[in-house]
Amino acid sequence: MRIEELVMGQKLTLQIVINSEQLEFPLTIMEVVPKKHGIYTNAIMKDEKVLSFKASGILTHLIVAFDDAKPHIFYNVTVQTLKSDSGNFCYFISTLGPSKEFNRRGAFRCFLGLYSSVQIGVNNTALDTTIKDVSVTGFSFILPATAREFKPGAIAHVVLTDYIQERNENYTFHLTGIIVRNYKLENGSTVYGCKLNAKVIGLDRYITIKERLQLNKSRKSH
């Protein structure tokens, strides 16, 4: 769904992601502005001051709950702090992207699409793969239709190697996790979702940087 499909009076949750920390604030829609692809909501006040979410390294997502359907989330929304004609603070929240179904049990996932190799089990040969996405609690990778299938419970190890040109920085993370789910794609390839065995130092910062850059590219393309 699009943000302009929301209705006045609807209850929302603003989710703030700072590194591996997550904060949530309740909001209520005051007005919907379809032409600007956005909504006006109440502002969050603390110690008689309005909270602003424009600091570097912060990701802002908007969660919408429904009585008869799964919640949806708008990723990487823009939150502007404004003052109404009455002198009260409010937020104008906008996004051009559609929402996605949201699973509250999962951590925020960052799409990668990076080529790598994966070793599954102890004595198996490493296989060419694509790391689909990563979060602070897990990762997923794709194997082609020609590869053998692996069942949940197997241990997988991949090396995430990435160079971020905008920051002239190289990143390398060893990701080891247990396969918890798998599903087929239309082309016959299989996606394997894994839960990390332990926290990976620096992964949260890397995810934040990637998401900020992807958001900036998305905004410049519109």
Image (cartoon, rainbow, N blue to C red):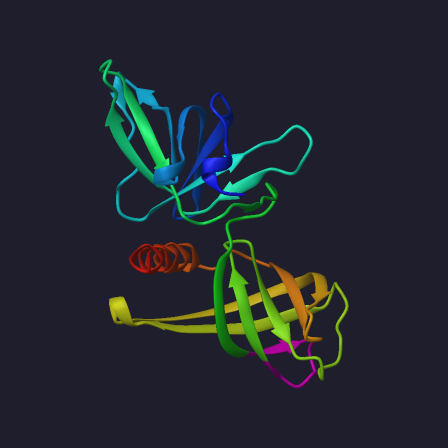
Q: Is residue 191 above or below residue 59?
A: below
Left or right: 102 as drawn, with respect to 146: left
Q: Residue at 59% x, 47% y: name it.
A: 106
* Magenta segment includes 26: no
Q: Residue at 42% x, 54% y: name it.
A: 204
Q: Residue at 41% x, 57% y: name it.
A: 207
Q: Horizontal and vertical percent for residue 218?
A: 36, 57
Q: Horizontal and vertical percent for residue 46?
A: 31, 20
Q: Horizontal and vertical percent for residue 205?
A: 37, 56
Give the quarter of the image for residue 25: top left
From this viewpoint, which residue is outermost toward the top?
Answer: 86
Give the quarter of the image for residue 81: top left
Q: Is residue 59 above or below residue 142?
A: above
Q: Residue at 31% x, 49% y: name it.
A: 57
Q: Quadrant of the N terminus?
A: top right
Question: Which span of residues is magenta-colored?
Answer: 117-128
Q: Quadrant of the C terminus?
A: bottom left
Say which of 21 and 5 sits in front.
Answer: 5
Q: Is residue 155 above or below residue 137?
A: below
Left or right: 207 as drawn, with respect to 174: left
